[in-house]
Image (cartoon, rainbow, N blue to C red):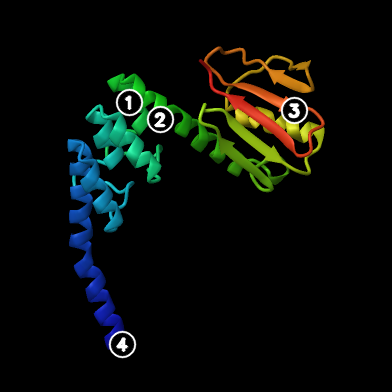
Amino acid sequence: MRLLGTLALIAIAALPAQAAIQDDLVAAAASGDARQMVKLVHAGADVDTANSHGDTPLLAAIRRHDPLVVDLLLSHGASVTETDNRGVAPLLEAERDGTASILALLKPEVAFAEAYQRLSLAPGRYGLKGGVLERQRSGTLIYTRWGMTYDQALIAARVLGGPGVEYANPEQASGKLRFHALNTRAPQVTLAIAASPWRIEVQPAD
């Protein structure tokens, strides 16, 4: 019993220290101090946790218009869906800011996170279970999966395309089906026919 009480006191004592290190990380991101950021992350700072004011490191870097710091945070696993205490997401803040280089970094990461979530929520016969989702440097998403039927692969392709996206009847060419989005801002989806495993490519809209 005494041991449990001691451990509880240690945990409580550690809370202010953790809050301080998170404040320091956000401050370093806001000032563009990449070296200090790396030190703090190695010391236990979390790249997604907000500081005492509710700001996350990634949002602080976006507001500083600093693509190098944004890239550093992303390389350390910063979430592109984590919001601040006002509910502002990184991509929304970047779109408000309009820095093209930061948008170019965030959009592929957001597309991957959203596609991963859609596949996670989809029924197992055409969802993430049993499949692998990867992102190329170009931003193209590639989903490979064994054991699907042709009809299941068609559904998976539409799941990857995103909610509310309408696709015209796919065109067949060179062993692939190309789904052309009726909305020009939607991604283009390509499904390799009779592949083993099935391979679905999602190319971001221009």
Pointer 1 and pointer 2: residues touching (CB < 8 Å)?
yes
Q: Earlier in the sequence, mark 1 or mark 3?
A: 1
Give the residue at mark 1. Answer: 94
Residue 200 percent coordinates (x, y):
68, 31
- On residue 77, which mark appears? none
Give the residue at mark 4. Answer: 1
Foreground disc of the pair 1, 3: 3
The answer to whether residue 82 is left or right of residue 65 is right
For mark 3, does the 10 Å Cα neighbourhood hold few (<14), some (14 to 19), or many (20 or more) residues?
some
Mark 4–mark 3 Cα distance, whole angstroms, equals 62 Å
The local secondary structure at tag 2 comes to helix
Mark 4–mark 2 Cα distance, whole angstroms, equals 49 Å
Determine the residue positioned at 27% across, 75% down.
Answer: 8
Q: Residue furthest bottom?
A: 2
* Quadrant including the N terminus: bottom left
Q: Earlier in the sequence, mark 4 or mark 2?
A: 4
- On residue 192, which mark appears? 3
Image position of 197 with respect to 185: above or below? below
The kind of residue on which mark 4 rests is Met
- On residue 106, which mark appears? 2
Determine the residue positioned at 66% across, 17% down.
Answer: 167
Mark 1–mark 2 Cα distance, whole angstroms, equals 8 Å
Pointer 2 and pointer 3: residues touching (CB < 8 Å)?
no
Determine the residue positioned at 75% across, 28% down.
Answer: 192
